[in-house]
């Protein structure tokens, strides 16, 4: 979802001279990292689409057992709250590429970016109503206004603001946990939660009108989660991405810095993830859950950074060409693939199609996610061989520029008549 022109015609074939990869290859690696983030987002979103009980602290009736519990633990500890941060970081990074592109071409950036945000908001609103209420595009569209207002901020200041934002959010959660603890409570989950999840399951298995109505009923709760949990963390990731883009971080990767990110992220980040998983899956006591959320605000970015560092280091390894070729096309078509994931899942789990919600064990859900993303990587690579952009990327670009973008990719000079 970028507008910066590329220096290579085929994004799945970066070149790597002895002096290091050129800027075009680095941009392709950004696409590949975005593709990796897209897989993690799918692993989380599909769990919410496959079960109305996910996130309630209750087991979905008939889908318990040691294997299901193990899969839930893996998804919660390693995936939840981590990959949207990586995706948000790349949104901020790509924002700097769009600024640079507009400056080189001598066009006004602000009107174009505002149209882009409007397009994202409209697409996200439709996505939330018809397919999946846990949409992230509307949040990105709103936070994009903040990013635009701060686009002249210095990289060091952007990093400091991001750290302060995360720290203040975490402290707010700790204070809230203290208030919850003082208010008392026996730590049991109200029967109304189970009744609501059961009713939502039946509604999502119903006719399309029932599915849409169920999505609309969930929107207030989702909006609360977006505003008070995801928004501060996403904004911080935006600012970190902005700082990285200003410093051209992907043009000269510091391997020692990447190793430090891995060491820190996989120790502190995983520790926070385990606490978050324990509170989410095994402990209904609300004060503890709020404490875990506060801890996760600080530790999840570290684990997301460790993931990014690991993937970026893999891009320099023996199988870098294969890895980049697999992930980059999916990342270039991230908007199309993100909405395509929700469409396929809606056809599988709701009354739009097979109505399998609450009927597929977590292991099967994870297998569906892996299969779906694998199919998207293959399809994306095929599509970009014949088209300049993904379908939704093409539409968003047309609206952003108020012009018709090319439909076919440019042909190499030696292929032209």
Image (cartoon, helix red, strand yellow):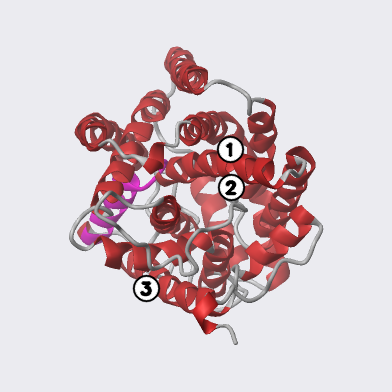
Q: Among all residues in the image, which is located at the extreme bottom? A: 417
Q: Position of residue 90 (x, y in %)?
A: 49, 44
Q: Residue at x 21, y 63 (%)?
A: 319
The span shown in magenta is: 67-81
The image quadrant where one finds the N terminus is: bottom right
Q: Residue 262: which quarter of the image?
A: top left
Which residue position holds label 3? Answer: 371
Q: Residue at x 21, y 33 (%)?
A: 256
Mark-to-mark CA distance, 2 and 1: 8 Å
Image marks 2 and 1: residues in contact by CB distance under 8 Å: yes
Q: Main secondary structure of the magenta part?
A: helix
| Label 3 residue SS | helix
Residue 20 visible? The answer is: yes
Q: Which mark is residue 304?
A: none
Q: Earlier in the sequence, mark 2 or mark 1?
A: 2
Q: Position of residue 237 (x, y in %)?
A: 48, 33
| Mark 2 or 1: the one toward you | 2
Question: Dot 2: few (<14), some (14–19), or many (≥20) neighbours within 10 Å?
Answer: many
Mark-to-mark CA distance, 3 and 1: 28 Å
Q: Nearer the viewer, residue 242 or 137?
A: 242
The image quadrant where one finds the C terminus is: bottom right
Q: Residue 280: which quarter of the image?
A: top left
Question: Dot 3: few (<14), some (14–19), or many (≥20) neighbours within 10 Å?
Answer: few
Which residue position holds label 2? Answer: 136
158 within the magenta span: no
| Label 2 residue SS | loop
Mark-to-mark CA distance, 2 and 3: 23 Å
Q: Nearer the viewer, residue 201 or 219?
A: 219
Which residue position holds label 1? Answer: 226
Question: Dot 1: few (<14), some (14–19), or many (≥20) neighbours within 10 Å?
Answer: some
| Label 1 residue SS | helix
């Amino acid at each position: 979802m970028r507008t910066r022109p590329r220096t290579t015609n085929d994004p799945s074939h970066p070149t790597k001279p002895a002096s290091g990869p050129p800027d075009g290859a680095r941009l392709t690696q950004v696409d590949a990292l975005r593709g990796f983030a897209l897989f993690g987002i799918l692993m989380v979103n599909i769990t919410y689409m496959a079960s109305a009980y996910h996130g309630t602290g209750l087991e979905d009736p008939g889908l318990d057992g040691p294997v299901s519990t193990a899969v839930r633990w893996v998804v919660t500890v390693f995936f939840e709250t981590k990959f949207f941060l990586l995706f948000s970081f790349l949104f901020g990074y790509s924002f700097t590429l769009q600024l640079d592109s507009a400056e080189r071409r001598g066009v006004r950036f602000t009107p174009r970016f505002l149209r882009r945000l409007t397009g994202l908001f409209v697409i996200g609103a439709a996505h939330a109503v018809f397919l999946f209420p846990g949409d992230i595009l509307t949040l990105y569209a709103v936070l994009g206004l903040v990013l635009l207002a701060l686009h002249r901020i210095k990289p060091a200041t952007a990093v400091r603001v991001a750290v302060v934002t995360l720290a203040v959010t975490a402290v707010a959660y700790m204070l809230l946990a203290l208030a919850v603890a003082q208010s008392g409570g026996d730590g049991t989950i109200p029967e109304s939660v189970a009744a609501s999840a059961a009713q939502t399951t039946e509604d999502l298995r119903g006719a399309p009108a029932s599915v849409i109505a169920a999505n609309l009923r969930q929107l207030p709760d989702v909006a609360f989660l977006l505003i008070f949990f995801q928004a501060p963390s996403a904004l911080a990731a935006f600012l970190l991405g902005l700082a990285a883009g200003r410093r051209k971080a992907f043009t000269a990767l510091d391997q020692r810095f990447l190793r430090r990110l891995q060491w820190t992220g996989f120790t502190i980040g995983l520790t926070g993830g385990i606490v978050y998983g324990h509170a989410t899956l095994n402990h209904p006591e609300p004060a503890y859950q709020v404490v875990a959320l506060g801890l996760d605000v600080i530790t999840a970015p570290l684990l997301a950074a460790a993931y990014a560092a690991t993937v970026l280091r893999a891009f320099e390894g023996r199988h870098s060409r294969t890895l980049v070729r697999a992930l980059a096309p999916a990342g270039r078509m991230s908007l199309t693939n993100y909405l395509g994931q929700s469409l396929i899942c809606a056809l599988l789990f709701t009354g739009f199609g097979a109505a399998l919600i609450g009927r597929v064990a977590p292991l099967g859900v994870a297998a569906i996610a892996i299969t779906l993303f694998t199919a998207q990587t293959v399809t994306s690579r095929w599509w970009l061989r014949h088209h300049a952009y993904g379908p939704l990327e093409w539409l968003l670009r047309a609206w952003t520029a108020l012009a018709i973008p090319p439909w076919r990719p440019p042909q190499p000079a030696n292929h032209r008549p």
